[in-house]
Each structure stands twice: as structure tokens, then as C-alpha cells.
Image (tube, helix red, strand yellow):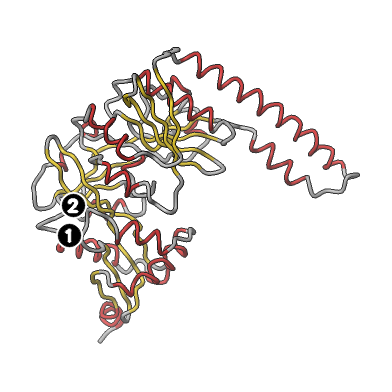
Amino acid sequence: MNTTQRTATRYAVRGFEPADQAAFLSLYETVFGHERSRDWFRWKFRENPYADHVPIVVATVDGEPIGFRSFFAQEMRIGGAVRTAFQPCDTMVHADHREQGLFGRMNEHAIDRYADGPPSFFFNFPNENSKPGNLAHGWQEIGTVPAYYRPQNPVGVLEDRTDDDSSSPATDPRAADGRRIAALADALEGAIATSHRAGDRLLVGSDGALEIERYETPPAETLETVYRRSVPDEIHTNRTASFYRWRFANPARTYAAYVARRDGEPVAALVTSSTDEYTRIVETLPRTLEDVAGLERLLVAALDDHADRGYAEAFGETLPAPLRFRFYPDTRLPLSALLQPTARTLLARDLGDGLGLESSSIDAWSFSRLDLDTT
């Protein structure tokens, strides 16, 4: 047996087994640099209400797992029908076993297994490394979904320099520089925050009939009520109270919600996920953006509450007028000159139902960050 044959026979591809979980979490940390817990795995895969199994394909060498092709099960609304879709995610191969065709073999295994559904289709936003492999196995490029950023507190660089100088002796000139920079940063931060607040409030009307409520835990039933007021025609994740309860149970994220009520009835809602560095607008309702007044009031409230974050981020059709509230797409100037674009290219692949999604346009889809497996 030659070397090529011997190497090929060492590798195998199979479905997920319970004993693979530890290897999955270990390789995830190695490849992506983030630690994920057993609770996270249980939430994302074992307790996912839209799959009756753990939808992960495993590549092994001599029986040991060294690669995974995972799928995030979702319930998607297409016109008046609801279909199950799988979003490929968390794809990884150990560095010692790359360039052996394992990504393609895991793809082929998944396509064969799910050819007759469910799911009805795959869709995802692959990075540049995995995009060619998807296209080679039947995925079609649909279009680009933009990401938007709003600078909230651009004094972080000054604060970082202050931190660097803080360990210097008091007699060191760098210590004096640090104190001056700290004072400047404090002054700038206050001025920028005040400017943002004043500008935001000028953009929204003073509708006294709107009552704004804040929630530490997103209220699932209320969110479904607002969603049902105006369900969009575009392809999107189907929103139900059970979906929201499961989706916001992600142990790797923290969420907060804002609800606008008029005469006691919820008319708009917004959900954020935040870290010390940034805040993300992950969901806005109604999805058709009809009640702009209520949604804009919630956006101003959320931005005000997170004025100390470095930036705010939104994705897809989340905001009624991004530029109006100084959210800029990272695919255009000025941000395109400063940032590596994070806009996502949507790919889709039909399976057994023949829905024709591979020939759809990007305008036929509607996304917020809540539609992404990473949120």
C-alpha cells in the first residue's frame, strides 16, 4: 500500500456520538480561541428544539475525532410555510490534519444524510476559508448582508495609553503624560456622550403616549406578540415565544430587552447583547419596521444606556435608518479604510424539497443578528 492510500484509510467520517463532546469543546478552543462550556453545547445542539439529534459530522483519524462540521437547526418562514433549515457552523479541523480533503468529505456526508430532509435547505455565511468548499458542493452565492457600526466612545485608545503609563513611577515623565491623557479622555468622553445623546434625541419625536420598558430577561411572549403584528414576506427565522425562550438561553451571551407600549399594548421591541467593549442590536420588532417611531425611541434608549461602550453594532435589516443614527456600513468609507469588513456573504443550498432558494435574490431574505448562530 502506498503512502497516499495508507493516509486515506486512516481518515473516516461519521455522525456524532455522545463521547465526542469533550473532543469538540477542546478543538473549538484550540481553533477559535474561545472556551465553550458543556452548558453551551447542550443549549446549542442537544436542546435545540428544531433537531431530534445532534447535527454534527465528525472526521476521525485512527478513530480519534480531529474535525467537525456542525449545523445550527432553525425554523424558517418562507412565504406562508414554515420549514426547518440547517446553518453550517463551528466547522473545524485540527491543524495537523488540514489539506487532506476532510472538509469536503464532511460536506458530502452531510448532504447524503440530509438529502431527503429534514432540513429543507442549508444556508450560511461562510468565511473566505470555507466559502470555496461550500460552492464546490452545490451552495450558491445569494448576496451580501451588511454590518453597521456606530462609534460610541472613541477615547479607548487614549485610555489604553493611560493604562500603559499608570505603572510608571510618579517622577517619570510618562506618568504625567498619563495623568494629562486621563483628564483629556474623561473630558472627551463626557463631551462625546453628551453630543450623541443630544443628537439622538433631536431625531425622535416626543410621543407622550409611548411608554418605554426595560427587561433584564427578554420577555418571550411579548416579543412574539410584536412579531405577529406584521410578519415579513421575506425568508427569515420564524419567531415564536418558545423560539425566543430557547434562543436567549444561550449561556455564552447576556441579553437585555426594550419594549415600547402605546395604551398598554406592545408596539415595538429591541434586544441587545453587550460586552464591556461593545453593544449589539440583535433584534428589532416589528420586522417590517412599520412602527418607526416606537423603534427609534427604543434605539435611542438602548444607545443611551450603553454610551460607555466603544461602539454599537447592527446587522442586516435591523435598523429603520442606519445612517440617520450614525451607523455606518463597514463596506464603505470611512469605516472600510479602518476595519476589515465583516459584512456577510449569504450562501444557500436546496435539499429534497426543491424550494428554488439557490436562485433567490438577497432581497428575498431578511436578517438580524438573531438569525446567526454566533449571536
Q: Position of residue 75 (x, y in %)?
A: 21, 46
Q: Residue at x 59, y 34 (%)?
A: 308
Q: Residue at x 33, y 72 (%)?
A: 20
Label 1 sits on what residue type? Ile
Task: Specify the label residue 138 is tagged with.
Answer: 2
Q: Position of residue 205 (x, y in %)?
A: 43, 12
Q: Residue at x 34, y 68 (%)?
A: 67
Disc 1 on helix, strand or loop?
helix
Q: For this view, does 320 lie left or right of residue 252?
A: left
Task: Tell which of 326 and 307 is nearer to you.
Answer: 307
Q: Position of residue 280 (x, y in %)?
A: 45, 38
Name the N-terminal-most of marks 1 and 2: 1
Do labels 1 and 2 touch, CB within 8 Å? yes
Residue annotated with mark 1: 111
Label 2 sits on what residue type? Gly
Residue count near mark 1 (Cα–Cα under 10 Å), binned few <14, some 14–19, many ≥20: some
